[in-house]
Structures are given as structure tokens and as C-alpha cells.
Amino acid sequence: MRTVDVVVIGAGPAGTVAASYLKKQGYDVIILEKEKFPRFQIGESLLPCCMEHLDQSGLLDAVVPKNFQKKTGAAFMKGDKRCEFFFEEQYTSGWTWTWQVKRADFDLTLAEATRAKGVDVNFECEVLNVTCSKDRQIVDYKDIDGNIFTLESKFIIDSSGYGRVLPRLFDLSKPSAFTPRGAVFSHLEDKNRTKEASNNIFVHSFDNNKSWIWAIPFSDGSTSVGIVGDKEKVEELAENNGEKYKKFIREFKDLNGRFVNSELKWEPKHILGYSVGVKQMYGEGFVLSGNSTEFLDPIFSSGVTFATASGLLSAKMTHRHLQGENVDWKKDYEDVVQGGINVFRSYVTGWYSGDFQTIVFADQIQNDIKNQICSVLAGYVWDQSNPFVKKHDTILPTLAKVIKMKEKSLNKE
């Protein structure tokens, strides 16, 4: 039986950030990843805040030479209404740009860079059983040839994403409070892309705020296009190899014919019921990070940022724990991560209720308000000096109500 300091489950952004950081601190770390890389994954639009996490874990320099598409902002559209956010105008001091990435390439880059640092990265290894205690963790896993191996470690970080290994084994999952939704998507050639469209993610709202389209441009001239809606709508669009999806994006008025003659790189895929919660983020001998904790909705592209943020924080906390500190996992980890999730939860709720759209599509939006919202969209959801973070649970509906009343009054005049 092999003994290591830390077992990390999952080689996505959360796992590689955690493993790389711990390797820098001198720990013997092994990653077990069920899939073979490169592999497709959604979550292709990053947020500026995650650049800090990549930098602190020592992975940023490995990503720069890949020349991924630079992302400098986000644009929201609804009919003839349009609102653009540029990260250089955000309220919080931080990164003013990031990347839009094909996750197959991005995740492989992080995994290879993590391996180059000396972390033992193992693909096509399925975790079968985990036994945790205060000082000794046992992991049984199977490799691609069906061989069973056992690892002993001092600690486990579960970054298994949608696989949710420990939430499944330890019955930690709980249903999401959000309405079940899904997405149907593909990559398309984008010959009609303007220069303006290259550096932003574009989000088009329709169907009375219930559905929306993403358009995420990549540096190779292709673009990821997805439609998010309720279960019934997604299933309908995905029928017959996505024929209705293809027709919809080619004819959708607000896309202005951008993809009318575009060829798809592969047949549309779809996922349903992606929102999920967790009862707790830590336990004796383990901690959860990334989508193993909670996933809300893709509307604000928060997935990878929460993955890298929680991956980095979980590694820092694990380091303190292994150094013999009396770590308060509830206060210093779960409450911190949950705090950021709760901010984005308010914005996701505000998107589908229409409050967020009322604000950003108002005839006029004050610069200070727009800049503070921009910081949230950049991922800086832990900046308590920002009123749109600190008062996240009340500020959107309150401001939306004021705007509606003002617009109603002006219409009467």
C-alpha cells in the first residue's frame, strides 16, 4: 500500500490548483482522475478573479503561451437593449482580463503543468471506496486495466466536479433550490464574428427571462453557442441530433445572422439538472472543492472561478492542518466559500426573476452602480467593501423596484 501526504480526487481546475499549491509547500501529492484527458467540458468562459488563483498556485505561466482568447468583458442583450461591462472599469482592484478557453485544452494544460511540478497525476483511475478518520485516510481505486490499488494519506481533497465522489460515497449531496434547467450546446465556425465580439462573452435573454443564449468566442475562430432553458425546452431543442437547436441559433433575430451559414464542429450535446448543493463541505480527514461543493447556474460563468478559489483555499487550509494548526474548517473554509456562492446565488436569482435585467437594461445606469456590479461579474464576490457584494441579498430587488417605479412615473408624464 502506497502512502502519500494528500490524495486529490479530480484533475480539473480545482484539483490541479490545490495539488500544485501543496506541492510548492513540499507535500507528496497524488491526483486520481476518472477520465482520460483531453476531454470535453463546459464552463469555457473564465472570470478575472481566477487569474489570481492560477498565479498563486504557480500555474499561470503555463497557460499564457497557449494564446487562449482574451476576455475583457461581458455583454448582455435583450431585443434592442444592450449593456456591456468592461472589467477595466470594475470597482474592485484586481485583474481586468481573463481568457475564454476550450476546456479540453485548458484543463490538460493545467494537468500537465501540475505533473511537471512533481505531482503524480493519474488518469482513468476510478475511486471505489474511501474511509476517513482523524489521521489516516484510505482510498481504494481501479485503473484502466481493472487493477485495484489502495492509497493511505493524511488528508483528501475531493475536486471531482460533477462526479462528486465523496458527496456520493458519504451521502452529502442535497437538492438545489433552483428550478431544474438544462443546456444544449455545440461549437460552431464563426466567420461573421466582429472584432468587438472577440473579446467578450455575449448573453442574449429571451422567452420572458426564462431562457438565454451564450456565445463564447475562441482564438481559433470558432465559438461555443449554448441555449439554457427549462427541461422541456432543452429536450425539445436536442431532439433529432439537435435539429431544432441548429435552426434556432441560425434564425434567432438578436444574433443578427451571425451563425446562419456556420458549420457545427460536432453534433449538439445537452445536459439537464446541473444545479446541485451539498450538506457540508468538509469532514474528518477530507474537504470538498470545486463543483463537489455546489454548482448554481452557468449564467455568470462562475463555475471555474469557484473551482480555482475553493481549490486554492482548500489547499491552504490543508497545509495549515498538516502543520498541526487547529483549523476551523467551518469558519475559515465553508463559510468563506459559501459566502461567495451566496453572492452569485442572489445574482442568478435576480437574472431569472428579471431584477438583474431591469437594472442593466434600464435607460440609464449610474457609473458607480455599473462598476460595482462589474466587480461581481469579474468574480470578486468576497470584496465586502462593494455594496453589491455586502448587500447582495437585498440590493438587486430593491434597486429594480426603484427603477420600475421611476420608469412608470416617466411613462405617465
Image: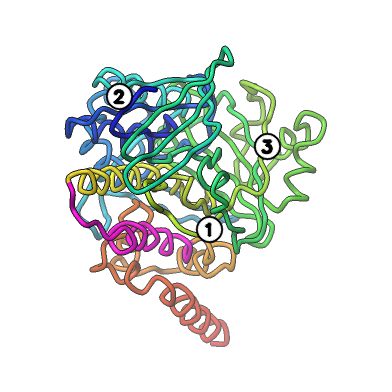
Residue 193 at x, y = what percent?
50, 30
How far is disc 1 from disc 3 in space, using C-alphas? 28 Å
Q: CA distance from mark 3 to mark 2?
A: 30 Å
* Of 71 and 36, the residue lying toward us: 36
Say which label, 2 or 1, has the lower sequence index: 1
Residue 268 in the image: x percent, y percent? 68, 30
Asked if the stretch drawn in magenta spans residue 404, the answer is no
Mark 2: give few (<14), some (14-19) or many (20+) Cα within 10 Å. Answer: many
The amino acid pointed to by label 2 is: Thr
Q: Secondary structure at mark 1?
A: strand
User: Mark 3 near mark 2, Cβ–Cβ under 8 Å?
Assistant: no
Relative to 247, 62 lies left or right: left
Which of 90/341 is in front? 341
Q: Which image quadrant is residue 412 in?
A: bottom right
Single out the mark in the foreground, 1 or 3. Answer: 3
Question: In the image, what residue occupies the spot 48% across and 83% down?
Answer: 406
Looking at the rendering, the stretch of residues picked out in magenta corresponds to: 324-347
> Is residue 192 visible to us here?
no
